[in-house]
Structures are given as structure tokens and as C-alpha cells.
Image (tube, rainbow, N blue to C red):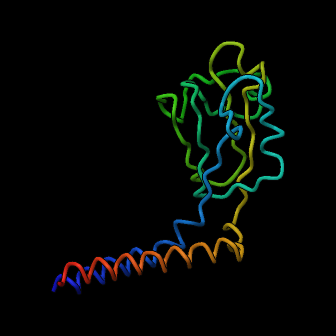
Amino acid sequence: MAIHRSLVIFAIVVLMTPAISLATNFVVGHDDGWKLGIDYEDWAKGKQFFVGDTLGKLYHPKPFVSFGDDFKSCTVPSNNSLGSFTGNDTIKLATTGNKWYICGVNGHCDGGMKLKITVPDGIAPAPSAASTLLATNFQIFLGMIFTITSIVIVY
């Protein structure tokens, strides 16, 4: 009975692996993160963002969602729809459209700590052959681990 339960769990994990690998975690500002001195417009150039992706490495404790005119003028909105932050957070891109993020610390937005991205309608493009191969290899690895674990448990 334990083997059948393990097979079901393994099948669920294997089937979920490709779906999990489709979302991208973008490290904002590459290794430098969310801080002064980074050209976030340049960082975002050429990147495609989709619903389900995340923006990570927002280490500064005050990122704010902003809107068009407030973004241009670096006006911190009175209502931060992102909620409170610990300083080491990620933002999940849950909807399509334009997204504006600014730093709420006085002078930081004017110093360049602001990011505008667009999340288009539609789904992310199909994964590349390399990512599909990686997912397949990962699934094979999981299968091997499962098989070895099952043998050890049974005997």
C-alpha cells in the first residue's frame, strides 16, 4: 500500500515540474538588487515579463507600487497596495498591464530607484529546448531517487 501511495505522490511531482519551471524569478538589478546607482530601465530592457513571474531581491524595505504620473514625479502613494516589506521580498506579477515600482525613501526615486515594466496579455512562450531538456533530466533524476527510495523502503 505504501508503494502505491508513493507512486501517486511521485506522479503528482513529475506532472507539476514543467508547470513550476515556466514562471521566471527576475532578480531585480541582477546581483546588485534594489539600490541606488542601478539603471533599472536598462535592466528591464529586453526582458519579457508574464503573469506568474516574480520580481525578487527587493532588499530595500520600502518598494511602492505607483501609477503613471506619480511614477514620473516620484510621488509616493498614500496607499501602498504591495503591503509591508521586510527588506528581502519578492513581488508576484499576478495581473497584466503596466507596473510601476518606486522606492519610498526620500530622494531614492529621484536618484533612479524606480522600475516600470509591462506584463502583456497572454501566456509565456513555450519553453526553449534547453529548459525542456532540463525539466526532462530533472524528472529522470526524481524517478531515480523515487525508485531507489522505494527499493530501500520495501527491503
Residue 87 drawn at (x, y percent): 51, 28
Question: Where the N terminus falls, by quadrant?
Answer: bottom left
Numbered circles on residues, count: 0
Residue 55 drawn at (x, y percent): 61, 45
Image point (71%, 18%), residue name: 108
In this rendered view, identify the residue nearer to me: 27 or 72. Answer: 27
In the image, residue 73 above or below residue 121: above
Q: In the figure, is residue 24 to the left or right of 86?
A: right
Image point (77%, 19%), residue name: 111
In the image, residue 119 above or below residue 84: below
Question: Within the image, what quadrant is residue 144 found in?
Answer: bottom left
Image point (60%, 72%), residue name: 134
Image point (72%, 13%), residue name: 107
Question: Where the C terminus falls, by quadrant?
Answer: bottom left
Q: In the figure, is residue 15 to the left or right of 68?
A: left
In the image, residue 127 above or below residue 65: below
Question: Within the image, what quadrant is residue 41 found in?
Answer: top right
Residue 52 drawn at (x, y percent): 57, 58
Residue 105 drawn at (x, y percent): 63, 16
